[in-house]
Amino acid sequence: MDIILLGPPGAGKGTQAARLETSRGMVQLSTGDMLRAAVKAGSPVGLQAKAVMDAGELVSDAIVSALIGERLDQLGDSGAIFDGYPRTAAQADALDLLLEHRGRSLTHVIELVVDEDALVERIVGRFTCGNCGAGYHDRFKPPVVAEVCDVCGASAFKRRPDDNEDTVRTRMIEYRAKTAPILPLYEARGLVSRVDGMAEMDVVSAAIEAILAR
């Protein structure tokens, strides 16, 4: 079973992919993670990507396709969860070919639908303990004692510099622009399902499992 998880940054794709890895033995394929791993491993595709990135250029679709093909060959019978790819109609066509050549095909495209204002609040309010990495949120999960980590007792917290409203809304615009061309392609094939990404994590997981069980 090979699926695509769609949704803007902060929609919960990573969390749900991790749960599917545990519950179904699937493997999350994030192009960013794969690029870093290939470069670190010094694989042929990784060396090619490194040369491009060192030159300050964007990695081409051809390199990304080769990277995905390389990773698919390592999966065996495990299902793939594509996260962050494809983002264009050309990439969608390339993915179809990559899967077809390996006797695989997409079974589901699941979009985590979010409310933009609520997502901004979710992302902008999050912070972590600078010592142990425990996660918190200004509104939804503050420390029991203000400015003291529940886990390790440290009092140094940090926030990601890009977790601000302007950046989050820009990401939303980019997401809509990038997914707009590919959703109709998959809808025409009857592959698209939508899940309320603003629901509790367990509810989202149950909805995804119900889709995959069809």
Image (spheres, grey):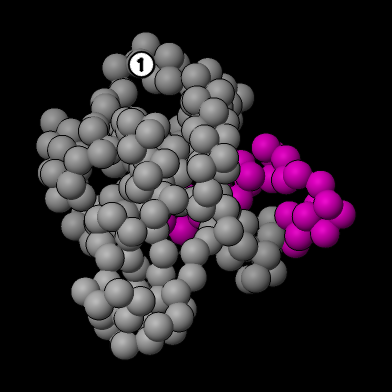
Q: Main secondary structure of the magenta part?
A: helix
Label 1 element class: helix
Instruction: Give coordinates of residue 7: x percent, y percent.
Output: 40, 36
Looking at the picture, tell me which residue is in the foreground, 159 or 68.
Answer: 159
In the image, which residues are magenta? 47-76
Q: Is residue 124 visible?
A: yes
- The answer to which quarter of the image holds residue 25 is bottom left
Q: Is residue 77 visible?
A: no
Structural crowding at the residue carrying mark 1, measured as other residues with C-alpha within 10 Å and reported as few (<14), some (14–19) or many (≥20): few
Classify residue 82 as left or right of residue 199: right
Instruction: List the single residue furthest toward the top.
Output: 188
Looking at the picture, tell me which residue is in the foreground, 19 or 72.
Answer: 19
Instruction: Give coordinates of residue 93: x percent, y percent.
Output: 55, 25
Residue bearing mark 1: 187
Task: Tell me how many marks there are.
Answer: 1
The disc labelled 1 sits on which kind of residue? Glu
Q: Is residue 53 magenta?
A: yes
Q: Is residue 202 above or below residue 194?
A: below
Instruction: Give coordinates of residue 159: x percent, y percent.
Output: 49, 64
Instruction: List the single residue furthest toward the right.
Output: 55
Which quadrant does the N terminus fall into?
Answer: top left
Q: Which residue shows up at 52% across the image and 49% down it?
A: 164
Q: Which residue shows up at 33% across the image and 31% down it?
A: 115
Q: Which residue shows up at 83% across the image and 52% down it?
A: 56
